[in-house]
């Protein structure tokens, strides 16, 4: 169905609804709202509804509800209506906000609310939902039925396209910094938001006092150095570089590094600068331009020819974020593993299959060859293993695999990537049998992902099929299949001990107290003889929304358990859902900074984390004393669990 047909059907439903309400104030609006929902899923659908808000309200779409008196509406309740309610409530709230947009723009005069009031309301609601402007849906949004998550995201993109960012600047700047502090691999949407911030800063009609944090972001992307301070354009900057002496070039290098490390963003000018250094025999300035410290310098000087080749082959304005990826890869000492260096040489020369080239071109365009996008993606992932995300796809298992391999076994990651990119096949083993991704049925990912990084784009379809095949081979077993799959899929370091909190057949909780005690005795340093976690371990959590209601199960990795700077025992974990700062209800808010987190980690106090834990692996030979865990600690975990996702059915 195209937009024209959908519009005609909506108009017919609206006319029928108006007739019904004229004779019966209680006439059902469900059919009309379903037509509105379908429109919201289509390009141009919000415009269709915008032109009909007067008719919708006249027909009685808001009835006698609070929506019929817009002056009393509350932004916090609007967020709940959009993000957590059912389809009917969400669609009505969306129509209400489209109505208020029409009031703001002067296309609809409403006796119940002024244009200024409507703008303030929408501004506050959008500020409360700024995460939707980042281009990624939360797990709760993604799991909503009837494309409601996508609809709400589309609504906010529509509102912001008409209202602009001027009144949202402070909130938007704070949101960008919050996302950057998590070290994401994908930054395109963040750069888009910074572009909008720049428009606000340099718009003479807008009041932008107190914008130091905004200026830092804009400068890092568009004017990071003295030679680029007025954003002259890449061609002009290239000409300026040719006229600079050694002192000026050194100053440029210093400022590039300072701004990149300040924000975690690399500028297109930075890529131009590095390429200029390579062609003008100024290679000795490259470490300064990358801002390398001792480990990074050692890695650079031991493997300088490889680093030079990576710059030549992967660093372009269109892939400039790979400058930061390369820097962080060197800072992690990744090349000191000889197999990784050799695998990167292979990656540089890898001949991509026609299918791989087409997939990369379809998503990332033709500005540079597909192999460049993929190599740049490799640098970003190896530099920030905790920055990879699953996009809006049900691929958390594959995403945590990419993260673990990039952290622990980068040569294996590069091997499976070579298979996938060159041969359109990935090989694995399950209990002694070879498993090939070729000709397997899709798993949870039914269509190729388009909102992920280049490495994920190529690997996720293969990994998803392999994981699904392993699952099929375990379907008839008497325990949760993750027990057998995870050690085979992720690697030898996954512990073979395994606990799951619920019966796989009935879903009923089993031995909850014993489950909690095993977790504490395995992971809590006070009760496991102070044994640190050597390798990240996959685990299953139960995601809840801000009202502590069940959303679904989700795969994460436990990175470590340690005391925070304030001596609070916390679990530090990697969440591949693109934004780890989530509100899980009951006052449980995942922290991404300020509590000792390493860039890319989320953390929670151990009891709060354990209350959302569903399954975990542990070393049976290193289990602590189960009886040493305090009764009140176990009781608190169980109380939080029973008060949220594990609440008994009434």
Image (cartoon, grey):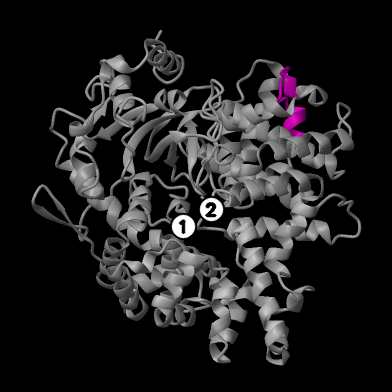
Query: Is residue 313 magenta-colored?
Result: no
The circle on residue 90 is none
Residue in the image at 8% along x and 51% along y: 432
Q: Which residue was labeled with disc 1? A: 384
What x and y, as percent, mark residue 452? 46, 57
279 and 63: which one is in front? 279
Crowdedness of circle 1 by 10 Å Cα count: few (<14), some, many (20+)? many
Q: Which residue was labeled with disc 2? A: 183
Structural distance between the alpha carbons of marks 1 and 2: 7 Å
Query: Is residue 55 magenta-colored?
Result: yes
Marks 1,2: beta carbons within 8 A: yes
Query: Is residue 293 positioned above or below 482 on the image?
Result: below
Query: Is residue 430 positioned above or below 302 on the image?
Result: above
88 and 298: which one is in front? 298
Residue in the image at 55% along x and 83% along y: 284
Is residue 577 at all visible to an observer of this figure?
A: yes
The magenta stretch is 54-67
Quadrant in the rendering for residue 218: bottom right
Helix or strand or loop: what does disc 1 sit on? loop
Query: Is residue 611 positioned above or below 431 on the image?
Result: above
Crowdedness of circle 2 by 10 Å Cα count: few (<14), some, many (20+)? many
Quadrant in the rendering for residue 527: top left
């Amino acid at each position: 169905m195209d937009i024209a047909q959908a519009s005609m059907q909506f108009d017919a439903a609206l006319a029928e609804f108006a007739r019904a309400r004229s004779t019966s104030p209680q006439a059902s609006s469900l059919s009309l709202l379903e037509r509105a929902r379908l429109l919201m899923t289509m390009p141009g659908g919000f415009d269709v509804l915008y032109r009909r808000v007067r008719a919708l309200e006249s027909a009685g779409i808001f009835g006698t509800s609070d929506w019929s008196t817009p002056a009393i509406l509350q932004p916090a309740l609007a967020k709940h209506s959009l993000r957590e309610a059912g389809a009917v409530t969400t669609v009505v709230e969306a129509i209400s906000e489209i109505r208020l947009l029409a009031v703001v723009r002067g296309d609809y005069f409403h006796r119940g609310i002024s244009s200024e009031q409507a703008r303030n309301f929408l501004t506050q609601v959008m500020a409360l939902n700024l995460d939707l402007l980042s281009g990624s849906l939360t797990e709760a949004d993604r799991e909503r039925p009837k494309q409601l998550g996508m609809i709400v995201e589309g609504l906010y993109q529509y509102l912001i396209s008409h209202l602009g960012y001027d009144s949202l600047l402070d909130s938007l700047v704070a949101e960008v910094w919050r996302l950057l502090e998590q070290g994401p691999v994908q930054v395109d949407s963040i750069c888009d938001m910074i572009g909008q911030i720049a428009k606000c800063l340099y718009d003479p009609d807008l009041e932008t006092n107190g914008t130091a944090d905004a200026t830092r972001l804009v400068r890092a992307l568009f004017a990071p150095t003295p030679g680029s301070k007025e954003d002259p354009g890449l061609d002009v900057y290239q000409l300026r570089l040719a006229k600079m002496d050694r002192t000026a070039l050194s100053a440029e290098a210093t400022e590039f590094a300072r701004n990149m490390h300040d924000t975690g963003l690399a500028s297109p000018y930075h890529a131009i600068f590095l390429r200029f250094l390579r062609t003008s025999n100024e290679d000795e300035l490259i470490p300064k331009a990358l801002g390398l410290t001792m480990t990074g310098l050692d890695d650079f000087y031991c493997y300088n020819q490889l680093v030079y080749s990576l710059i030549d082959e992967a660093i372009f304005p269109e892939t400039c974020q790979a400058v930061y990826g390369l820097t962080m890869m060197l800072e992690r000492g990744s090349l000191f593993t000889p197999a990784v260096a050799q695998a990167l040489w292979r990656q540089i020369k890898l001949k991509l299959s026609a299918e791989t080239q087409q997939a990369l071109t379809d998503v990332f365009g033709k500005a540079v060859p597909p192999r460049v996008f993929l190599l740049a993606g490799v640098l970003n992932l190896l530099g920030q293993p905790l920055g990879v995300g699953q996009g809006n796809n049900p691929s958390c298992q594959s995403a945590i695999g990419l993260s673990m391999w990039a952290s622990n076994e980068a040569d294996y990651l590069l091997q499976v990537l070579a298979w996938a990119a060159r041969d359109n096949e990935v090989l694995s083993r399950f209990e002694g049998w070879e498993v090939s991704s070729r000709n397997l049925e899709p798993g949870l990912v039914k269509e190729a992902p388009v909102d992920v990084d280049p490495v994920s784009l190529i690997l996720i379809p293969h990994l998803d099929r392999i994981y699904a095949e392993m699952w099929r081979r375990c379907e008839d077993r008497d325990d949760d299949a993750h027990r057998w799959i995870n050690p085979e899929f992720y690697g030898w370091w996954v512990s073979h001990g395994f606990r799951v909190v619920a019966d796989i057949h009935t879903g009923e909780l089993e031995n909850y107290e014993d489950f909690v005690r095993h977790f504490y005795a395995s992971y809590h340093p006070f009760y496991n003889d102070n044994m640190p976690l050597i390798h990240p371990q996959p685990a299953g959590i139960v995601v809840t929304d801000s009202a502590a209601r069940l959303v679904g199960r989700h795969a994460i990795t436990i990175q470590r358990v340690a005391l925070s700077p304030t001596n609070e025992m916390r679990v530090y974990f990697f969440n591949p859902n693109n934004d780890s700062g989530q509100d899980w209800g009951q006052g449980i808010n995942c922290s991404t900074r300020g509590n000792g987190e390493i860039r890319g980690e989320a953390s929670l106090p151990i009891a709060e984390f354990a209350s959302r834990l569903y399954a975990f692996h542990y070393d049976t030979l290193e289990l602590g004393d189960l009886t040493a865990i305090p009764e009140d600690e176990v009781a608190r975990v169980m109380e939080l669990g029973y008060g949220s996702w594990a609440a008994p059915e009434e």
